[in-house]
Image (cartoon, rainbow, N blue to C red):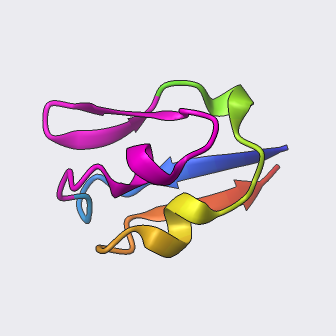
Amino acid sequence: MPRPIVDEKKCKGSAVCKEVCPMNVFEIIDGKAKVVKPKECIGCRACEVQCPNQAIKVVDD
């Protein structure tokens, strides 16, 4: 089961992940990306590829 992990130290809150995620897994809360629907992740890795700060990794559990 894929799930995205956000490195809060690297995240600058650009919201690119929220924009590119087809499953609406992310929200921007307090200026940082948060995974709010982890079970909805389909593992497309759009968030990981598009994040300008390399703050997201999609892992497969």
Which percent across, then down, holds residue 14?
Answer: 22, 56
The quarter of the picture where the N terminus appears is: top right
Q: Is residue 31 magenta?
A: yes
- Residue at 58 percent across and 25 percent down: it is 37
Q: With 39 as the anchor, is 31 left or right in this view?
A: left
Q: Nearer the viewer, residue 14 or 22?
A: 22
Q: Quadrant of residue 54?
A: bottom left
- Residue at 77 percent across and 45 percent down: it is 42
- Residue at 23 percent across and 43 percent down: it is 32
- Is residue 23 placed above or below 6 in the rendered structure? above
- Is residue 23 placed above or below 14 in the rendered structure? above
- Residue at 68 percent across and 46 percent down: it is 3
Stretch of the chain drawn in magenta: 12-35
- Is residue 30 placed above or below 16 in the rendered structure? above
Which percent across, then down, holds residue 9?
Answer: 23, 60
Q: Quadrant of residue 57?
A: bottom right
Q: Is residue 52 magenta?
A: no
Which percent across, then down, holds residue 31?
Answer: 14, 40
Q: With 50 as the anchor, is 42 left or right in this view?
A: right
